[in-house]
Image (tube, grey):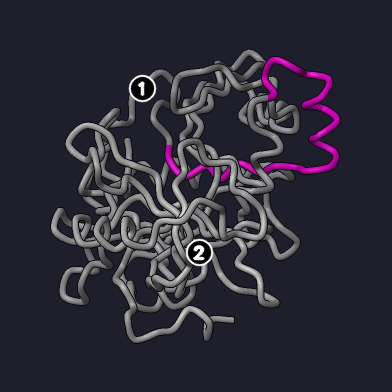
Amino acid sequence: MLATPGALPSAGVEGQWAFEVKQDGQRAVIYLPGDGTLLVRARSGTDITAAYPELLPLASVLGGRRAVLDGEIVAPDEHGRSDFERLQQRMGLAGSPTRAARMALAVPVHVMLFDVLYLDGELTTGLPYTARRGLLEGLGLKGAAWSTPGAIVGHGARAWEEARDAGLEAKRVASRYEPGVRSKSWIKIKVHHLADVIVGGWVPGRGRLAGLPGAVLVGERHGGRLHYAGSVGTGWNQSERARLAELLHVAAIGTCPFSEVPPVAGARWVLPRLVGEVRYTTRTRAGQLRHPSWHRLRPDLAPDGLT
């Protein structure tokens, strides 16, 4: 079951929703057959058990009870917040158990178990969220590398204030679990920040976007140099994209304006004079924008003034 991006439910209906802090990690389904073993599968269905050896003790926590649990594997930072950039160091190691074990010491993970799909021989997907949540909490899953995240029914505004830095997920309390469906009964409410950036290049689109920018390459000035901040490929309608194409063609140059050439195939460079405002969720340690989308041009801002 997948979440649908959306807005915080209004105060008039918030009692119909439960709120959980959004986790930024790798989605996983954990199979506990009750024989002292476990199987961890990624959203793609790939067996990733060997990539996360610190989860293996979870196999014996329920004794002989059989269960299938849904959750998110995260790599907490020094403040206990999920950090996807840290987690990337652990992903893709299922085929290298020795390296996975070594990385488990350097970058430990934690699985947040937020749903139960099967328990003691019975499918639970047809039960409402509140019933499934009760079963999950009754399992007492709290350990060094796993836990059940907190949830609050109603009080959406208060939950949003407390989770503003991470984002929030809202789940309709009467909803059943819908495998394989991006459901409107599960809303992902993201935090978005704004940044003023300078366009330094672009990548041509394909198909119906031929001749138009498929993405723009943006940067920010620090110490008089233009540092690459990422690629932005969403947020325009057709007319806005066409207008931007005109401006980019006029500003074309033959050399890269960034302090270091971004590793982007097919990039075309422009004079760094167009300023835009973008939305983004977080930044990487290198300062690049994560999940950026175009908001608007800022003709009122001079690129030399953005330091």
Residue appearing at x 23%, y 42% in the figure: 183
Q: The residue tagged with tag 1: helix, strand or loop? A: strand
**Is residue 272 or residue 131 the one in the foreground?**
272
Mark 2–mark 1 Cα distance, whole angstroms, equals 34 Å
**Where 188 falls versus 92 (above or below)?**
below
- The N terminus, quarter of image: top left
Q: Which mark is residue 122?
A: 1
Give neighbour class at mark 2: few <14, some 14-19, many 20+ (Cα, 10 Å).
many
Residue 68's x, y, as percent? 47, 26
Residue 176's x, y, as percent? 24, 39
Residue 190 part of the magenta-drawn span: no
Residue 19's x, y, as percent? 37, 61
Residue appearing at x 71%, y 65% in the figure: 79
- The C terminus, quarter of image: bottom right
**Is residue 11 or residue 211 the one in the foreground?**
211
Give the left or right position of residue 91, taking residue 16 as reference: right
**Where 48 falls versus 145 (above or below)?**
above
- Earlier sequence position, callout 2 versus callout 1: 1
Residue appearing at x 67%, y 31% in the figure: 58
Q: Amino acid at mark 1?
A: Glu
Q: Quadrant of residue 243?
A: bottom left
Give the left or right position of residue 244, taking residue 282 as reference: left
Residue 280's x, y, as percent? 44, 63
Give neighbour class at mark 1: few <14, some 14-19, many 20+ (Cα, 10 Å).
few
Residue 100 part of the magenta-drawn span: yes
The residue at which mark 2 appears reads as: 166
Q: Which mark is residue 279?
A: none
- What stretch of residues is rendered in magenta? 93-115
Residue appearing at x 51%, y 52% in the figure: 23
Q: Amino acid at mark 2?
A: Ala
Q: The residue tagged with tag 2: helix, strand or loop? A: loop
